[in-house]
Image: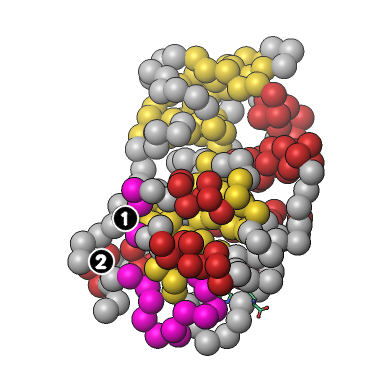
Amino acid sequence: MKHYRFPIDGTPEIGARTTLVGSDARHVRNVLRLKPSDSIILFNSSGDEFKARIVGFEAEAVTALILASSRPVRESPVSIVLAQAMLKEKKMDRVVRQLCEIGVTAWIPFFGARSVARPAEKKLAARTERWRKIAVEAAKQSRRLQVPRIRPAGDLEAVLAAADGFDLKIAFWEGAPVSGGWPNPGSSPDSVFLLVGPEGGFAEEEVARARDRGFVPASLGPRILRAETAAVVACALAQHRYGDLGSASSERRP
Ligand code: SAH
């Protein structure tokens, strides 16, 4: 039987009861039509996974009994944060979903100088909520143990400040030399911060500002990618080079 997965807060003990509410409870009840004694998997943001059994339904809540806990390794050893300049609506939805599948730790939308999409504050708040829902769905889908954090949109300055203290900072720019560019640290980085521009690319002044704050401009090859393709390729390559996708970190390319 397929085990459905739901995020919870905290770290319940074995034998404790925990409650799902809101859309998760409705999903269990009305969509999946699970019954008391059915099993589900719960996970928290610290990387614990719990086997649980449904033991009761209340008006708006589902109670589950914790049967076992484990700590599978499904999160990358490197924390990858990607800041994406604002794109048109549907593209942002797709980018955030795919990045969550590839294993970003956090995603930060920001207004690039050439971002055409500039939603008003109220609309932006609704979209941020939507991206957070997408991150939860994608984390479930990919059986991740952590739901990626979706930060509120800011400007480039806020992004550069958020990148302070990261081991590696890479700004993807089609003006960077095609070969080289990707930093090749001697030891495995713990944290990598990636910057991807809007449909119209970064203004040179933005690249210069990022460089001043420790970002290395790097290429994604000789072809120009759409911004939403660039984000996915950048994240997959970072996970490959520094994280847990397809290469032991000891096999890092020169
Ligand atoms: N200004 C370009 C398109 C920008 S592509 C033009 O229209 O000619 C959108 C974003 O994707 C860029 O800001 C960059 O972050 C990333 N990108 C796309 N192709 C890239 C490449 N070959 N190398 C590095 N970054 C790339």
| Mark 2–mark 1 distance (CA, rounded to whole Å) | 9 Å
Residue 169 belongs to magenta span: yes
Between 243 and 181, the one lying in front of the other is 181
Mark 2 in CB contact with mark 1 (< 8 angstroms): yes
Q: Disc 2 marks which residue? A: 185
**For marks 2 and 1 on the same chain, the one whose residue lies earlier in the sequence:** 1
Between 176 and 189, the one lying in front of the other is 176
Q: Which mark is residue 167?
A: 1
Q: Is residue 227 left or right of residue 253?
A: right
Task: Give the main secondary structure, helix, strand or loop, of the magenta stretch.
Answer: loop
Q: Residue at x 53, y 46 (%)?
A: 158
Q: Which mark is residue 130?
A: none
Q: Considering the image in quadrants, where does the N terminus appear? A: top right
Q: What amino acid does circle 1 point to?
A: Asp
Q: In the image, which residues are magenta?
A: 165-183
Q: Considering the image in quadrants, where does the C terminus appear? A: bottom left
